[in-house]
Amino acid sequence: MVAQREETFRISQRIVYWLVFGLFMILLATVVLPVTIALAGQPYADLSFAPLYGAAAAFIWIPYLAECWRLTKTVTLSEQGFSIRKLARKTRQFRYSDIVAHNERKEVGRGDSFMVLTVYLKNDFFIIKSNTFPEYDRLKAHFCQFGESIPYRKVVTLPERNRLRWLLAGLALFIIANILFGYLAHNQADHTKARLTAVTDVVDRITENRPKGSFKGVYVRLRQWPELNFYASRRAYTQSLQPLKEVIRVNQPITLLIPESEFRKKIAHTEPLTIGDKYIKYGLISVYGIYQDHAVRLQSAEPVFEPTRTNPLFRTILLVFLLLICWTGWVYVDRHSVIRTD
């Protein structure tokens, strides 16, 4: 039975709130967090982790935006026809004769199941879900009068497909740029031992590196260079470094042995920084010897080599895996039947 008067049905406000909350959380996770990590307390952006995290986290945008583009926001029924407004599109008017077919199927969400009605039109389609429209049963009864019931068919409009392709292509380009950066930031490995030089200054602070409770080393902050963290890794020493936080005296002079190249580049500024020096943990300098009066006298027994900054091969393997996910997404989108909306 065709509607005799104009009547508008809207999605639940709860869904709108969840979409806004989801957008906020995705922005926080994919933009704010990596940018904050990269820029926090650094004279140069630290790109050792943020681009890798950003490339992986960016995949969250694709299903989120795809769902938003397909989400029906309002349905207006009248005697002459009906109008549909999707979340990211303007309202479109249709005649009931434009309905070609329809399908209803069950989907399972988090903790519950719901029904999904897909209505196929000559030049578009729209979806109505029982968990988003309170009047789902009325809308289903109305639209199922027109067209034929068919098995579910995956479709996408041409603009939606093009937007998804642009997203995937842009993400792929970002991943490729990430791979290239790994090679540009890589300092050529030098198999000769690095020369060490001594740096003496007053200890401003000492902190332990304990990710998930596991002791990895100690950071020493010197008063003259507050932007730098001098890091002694437990892997470089045969002696235990765990007592250092208690033994090293703050506000007292300390002598640290660091690679001479790090001294020239980051302290004396007599040698130019490479791309890797600038953008891969600029503020971190490895320490291979610690001396403070007679209380602390430690020196690494391991051979010291110049830092290479990045591992391009490992980075490439990881990012190629993400490129494969992009390609899989592209193939998945292409398997949908395309509906031209013109």
Image (cartoon, rainbow, N blue to C red):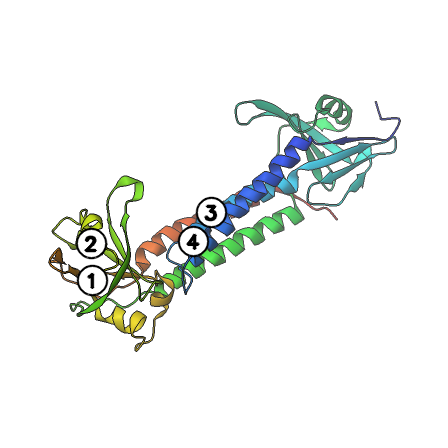
- Residue 126 picture quarter: top right
- Can residue 269 be seen here? The reply is yes
Q: Are marks 2 and 1 in contact (CB under 8 Å)?
A: yes
Q: Which residue is mark 3?
A: 57
Q: Which residue is mark 1?
A: 254
- Disc 2: CA contacts within 10 A as few (<14), some (14-19) or many (>=20): many
Three-letter amino acid code of the residue under disc 4: Ile
- Residue 89 picture quarter: top right
Determine the residue positioned at 56% across, 52% down.
167
Relative vertical location of residue 180 with respect to residue 32 in this rendering, above or below: below
Q: Which residue is mark 2?
A: 248
- Disc 1: CA contacts within 10 A as few (<14), some (14-19) or many (>=20): many
Relative vertical location of residue 48 with respect to residue 157 in this rendering, above or below: below
**Between 299 and 223, which is closer to the camera in this rendering?**
223
Task: Indicate which label's residue lies in the foreground, 4 or 3.
Answer: 4
**Between 165 and 188, which is closer to the camera in this rendering?**
188
**In the picture provided, is 245 more to the left or to the right than 36?**
left
Q: Which residue is mark 4?
A: 37
Three-letter amino acid code of the residue under disc 3: Ala
